[in-house]
Amino acid sequence: MSDDLGWGDVGFNGNEIIQTPHLDEMASAGLKFQRFYSAAPVCSPTRGSVVTGRHPFRYGIYFANVGHMKGEEFTLYEALKSKGYATGHFGKWHLGTLTTEIADANRGKPGNTRDYSAPWHHGVDTCLVTESKVPTWDPMLVPKSIKSRKNGWLPLEKKQVADFYGTHYWKGENQPVPIDSSDLRGDDSMVIMNAALDFITGAVKSGQPFFSVIWFHAPHLPVVAGPEYRARYPGTTDYEANYYGCITAMDEQVGRLREALRALGVAENTMVWFCSDNGPEGQKGKAPGTAGSFRGRKRDLYEGGIRVPALLEWPARVKGGSATDFPCGTIDYFPTVMAAVGFEVPDPDRPMDGINLLPVIDGDLEERSFPMGFQSAKQLAWVGQRYKLYSKNGGKDFELYDLLNDPAESKDLAKDHPDVVKRMTGELERWRASCRSSDAGEDYKN
């Protein structure tokens, strides 16, 4: 999973500037999702949906840096660990704080136990993780000389004086990696992939099946790209060169992963998924990221905020060069992986928002039986096969869009189809009531 990568920021979705050759090859070798949705238009909520199959409002991660993964939630890590899988998580975590002992990242600090919820609490055997964002080059460091840390800066030169950025990498409880470690220098995506490949290689050599979550920081701000990656984008601003360059550097690491799986002899029957956690940061025309032709960006429940680039490569089951318009998203990872490994969830009565996508992958399912729900701040959305219901004010007013004929959401059809609005608002309200019940702890009684 990339971080803040827009739908239009990759070559396989038509970008002619940003170089993503390895992701483009992955698209040619696998399945491209044309309508893949992040569960939220911001980071933390989406990430929780990946490992639970549930909407984040069910377990209290309502926004970025709000809430944490509750111990009562059943995660992919725990499920696969019980089936004998080695479990690993590398890169961003953002589902809770990682320490109660030292100041760290956005919320970690001495004595703060409220949101302490780390990978090692949820079935992860091996990890190299940060609570939240870091610079995408030399992730521990920020130049002393810069005035603004928001968008990024030029990569550090050898003799340049730098401060600690403020976010540690962690290997386990009370195990921060020293900030001066040579393992944490250079491209941040490489740092993450180095650890992931060590884990995967170890699992394969020991004959153990593995589950690895790799969550890059790129291209979340602050973006910094190394000299060789910046050099690929002459004639651009520093902001653009850093943004484009860090995506190309991340793409290179995806290529390393694919190559390593082939070299280890396990590529054929390994599912490799790729997506983004939400749409691109910043204002359209002022920031380099693009949502393509879609309306909205990060923090919006319009398509540009939640429709994200997505791929699946799985040679044993997926025909290369295929694509699907089936509406699906990060909530579907959990039930799909569970079905693939033959796992029966121990609490079948617990509400699950995701569905098993294996019939979609096999070409046997063309229409989602029930819409997908979205909540973020005051925004609401209810996305079906054709129509999308949207409210910016908590349901006081609704807009309606025909996504099959108007994916750019340019024409509000609410007044033309009051019957559709009435039906969909009823479905949405029943789903919201279910989420409120889950959030109150009703799902944990069994």
Image (spheres, grey):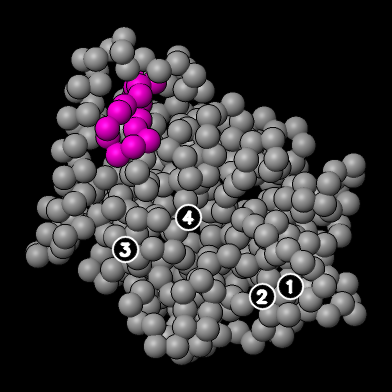
Q: Residue at x 57, y 53 (%)?
A: 3
Q: Which residues are magenta?
A: 385-401
Judge depth for marks 1 and 4 and give the one in front.
Answer: 1
Q: What amino acid is found at the position of numbered circle 4 in the picture?
A: Cys
Label 3, on which residue? 75
Q: Do the CB atoms of the residues marked 4 and 3 lie less than 8 Å apart? A: no
Q: Secondary structure at mark 1?
A: strand
- Seen in the picture, residue 84 relative to 24 is either above or below; the reply is below
**Coordinates of residue 338 in the picture (x, y in percent):** 30, 53
Label 4, on which residue? 43
- 144 on left or right of 41: right
Q: In the image, is residue 19 part of the stretch drawn in magenta?
A: no
Of residue 284 and residue 54, the one placed in the foreground of this image is 284
Q: Quadrant of the C terminus?
A: bottom left
- 304 on left or right of 362: right
Q: Residues within 10 Å of mark 2 (few under 14, many from 20)?
A: some
Judge depth for marks 2 and 4 and give the one in front.
Answer: 2
Q: Which mark is residue 165?
A: 2
Label 1, on which residue? 142
Q: Earlier in the sequence, mark 1 or mark 4?
A: 4
